[in-house]
Amino acid sequence: MTAASTKEIILARLQALGVPFTLFEHAAANTIADCLALPCAEADVTFCKNILLCNRQQTAFYLYVTPPEKPFRTADTSKALGVSRLSFAPANCLVEMLHLHSGSLSPLGLWFDESRKITLVFDRDIRTGGRIAFHPCDNTATVVFTQKDFFTRIVPSLHHDPVWI
């Protein structure tokens, strides 16, 4: 599956849900710093770091969504989740499990995790009100929603009950 077709699938699902969103097309934004430099990065828009983690055996996977300014330590996240030490999941897991590549990770990709192998984990600090932004599994675009729509309409449609830490 190509990034373009993945993006089209994501956008079609959002439209089918009837969730209002704004789509911004832009040059590839590979890092959180790139995202924060985008014209759509307005004061009321929360961009998130999205990190795919796994245990040593690669039998448990976690998509951790955290604020961009918050320092990330795998040991702290492991402790908060009550699991043995986590590490970054190999890049091939992004392709195999979520049909996307590094720099394009987003909770929206969980629509492709039909076997529910990935646990969705939100840092409590991302719920700030206003709006929230994610790539539609393609880092040449960003979709922006109200936080209310994201958490009450989109997250339930992902069929991954979130864990909050």
Image (spheres, rainbow, N blue to C red):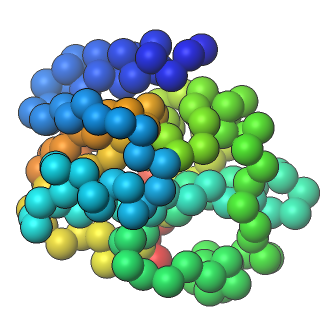
Nearest the eye: 13 or 164? 13
Residue 64, x across and y down, in percent? 52, 62
Q: Quadrant of residue 92?
A: top right
Q: How many marks?
A: 0
**Vertically, is 109 above or below 122?**
above
Q: Quadrant of residue 36?
A: bottom left
**Vertically, is 135 above or below 122?**
above
Which quarter of the figure is the N terminus placed in?
top right
- Residue 140 visible in the picture: yes
The single residue placed furthest to the right in the displayed view is 57
The residue under the point 49% across, 41% down is: 104
Residue 33, x across and y down, in percent? 39, 63
The residue under the point 13% across, 25% down is: 18
Residue 57, x across and y down, in percent? 90, 57
Q: Is residue 54 rendered to the left or right of residue 47?
A: right
Q: Quadrant of residue 123?
A: bottom left
Q: Is residue 130 rendered to the left or right of residue 84?
A: left
Q: Is residue 43 rendered to the left or right of residue 96?
A: left
